[in-house]
């Protein structure tokens, strides 16, 4: 198995929204904001080459948004989803499967693109796109709070084209796909999928928005976007204890600098990062 980090570019989100109840005097040292209080974040996907499969996890923001949308989120940087795949010698047709951790626009926007006639088509023509029934239904009937994050043009075309499939989960919220372990989480949104990937060398957890950056390991560092912050804290605590015990690597989708880290427990019993690096 080969695992590659796929950078799709950066965007900006309000620092206060990203750090929740943590005061600016603390978070501004971790990710310095611009004059509008906006911080820069990555949208980092993962490509797994496993036997005859080429599995992409998440797809970034995509490039079909209008100027108004871009003025809110400032997509920038040299990297793009297809550009980063091309650097690995891969064409869109080569991708066999796309796992969408959840259907917020910064994770699923790249799944669907416009063709030369302006029609919405799957970006990866030969891929099966994987979600789960519970999250799909949640995204299709969004609550007012999440409505601006679930943009139908990013995912409804997948259903229309017949390329969408749902992963099965058991009563404990655990599932498996191609030997990858998946777990449903409910703090950030309903039924987001955490993905744990085990190869010969190490185990890597794709944290999605459970822990968006290395600066969100602290239990109080919960995004203002999260639907159920107390649930996030509970899910994060359990996850961090397991990841520490099993010496997993954590992969961060939104950290602008650090791709992965391992964990260590301080003398005071707090779990924090060690060995932050690139994948
Ligand atoms: Zn996100």
Image (cartoon, helix red, strand yellow):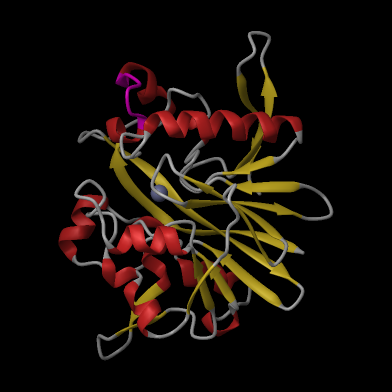
Q: Nearer the viewer, residue 29 or 117?
A: 117
Q: Total label count? A: 0
- Identity of the residue drawn at 38% across and 47% down: 189
The part of the image, by quadrant, that contains residue 272 is: top right
Residue 60 visible in the displayed image: no
| Residue 102 x/y as whole percent | 43, 57
Q: Nearer the viewer, residue 90 or 23?
A: 23
The part of the image, by quadrant, that contains residue 51 is: bottom right
Q: In this rendering, is residue 45 above or below 202?
A: below
Residue 124 is left or right of residue 160, and the answer is right
| Residue 14 x/y as whole percent | 27, 38
Residue 182 visible in the displayed image: yes
- Check the image and name the residue furthest to the left: 68
- Identity of the residue drawn at 56% across and 40% down: 258
Residue 277 is left or right of residue 117, and the answer is right
| Residue 101 x/y as whole percent | 49, 57
- Image quadrant where one finds the N terminus: bottom right
The part of the image, by quadrant, that contains residue 199 is: bottom right
User: Which secondary structure is most common in the magenta stretch?
Assistant: loop
- Identity of the residue drawn at 49% across and 24% down: 219
- Check the image and name the residue furthest to the front: 171
Q: In this rendering, is residue 251 above or below 6?
A: above
Q: Nearer the viewer, residue 182 or 68?
A: 182
| Residue 125 x/y as whole percent | 49, 85
Please provide the residue range marked out in magenta: 19-24
Residue 19 is left or right of residue 163, and the answer is left
Residue 151 counted in the magenta span = no
- Check the image and name the residue furthest to the bottom: 117
- Check the image and name the residue furthest to the top: 268
Residue 23 counted in the magenta span = yes
């Amino acid at each position: 198995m080969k695992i590659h980090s796929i950078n799709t570019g950066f965007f900006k989100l309000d620092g206060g929204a990203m750090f929740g109840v943590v005061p600016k005097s603390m978070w501004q040292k971790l990710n310095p904001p611009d004059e509008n209080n906006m911080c820069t974040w990555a949208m980092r996907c993962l490509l797994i080459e496993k036997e005859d499969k080429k599995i992409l996890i998440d797809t970034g923001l995509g490039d079909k948004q209008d100027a108004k949308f871009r003025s809110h989120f400032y997509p920038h940087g040299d990297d793009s989803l297809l550009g980063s795949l091309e650097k690995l010698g891969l064409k869109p047709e080569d991708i066999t499967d796309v796992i969408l951790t959840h259907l917020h626009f910064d994770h699923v926007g790249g799944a669907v693109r416009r063709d030369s006639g302006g029609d919405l088509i799957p970006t990866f023509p030969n891929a099966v796109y994987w979600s789960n029934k519970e999250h799909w239904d949640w995204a299709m009937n969004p609550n007012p709070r999440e409505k601006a994050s679930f943009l139908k043009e990013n995912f409804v075309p997948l259903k229309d084209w017949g390329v969408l499939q749902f992963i099965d989960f058991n009563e404990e919220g655990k599932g498996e796909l191609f030997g990858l372990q998946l777990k449903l989480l409910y703090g950030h949104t309903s039924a987001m999928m955490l993905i744990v990937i085990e190869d010969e060398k190490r185990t890597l957890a794709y944290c999605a928005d459970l822990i968006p950056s290395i600066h969100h390991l602290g239990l109080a560092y919960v995004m203002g976007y999260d639907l159920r912050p107390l649930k996030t804290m509970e899910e994060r605590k359990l996850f961090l204890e397991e990841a520490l015990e099993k010496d997993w690597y954590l992969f961060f989708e939104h950290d602008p600098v650090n791709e992965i880290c391992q964990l260590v427990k301080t003398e005071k019993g707090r779990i924090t990062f060690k060995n932050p690096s690139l994948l």
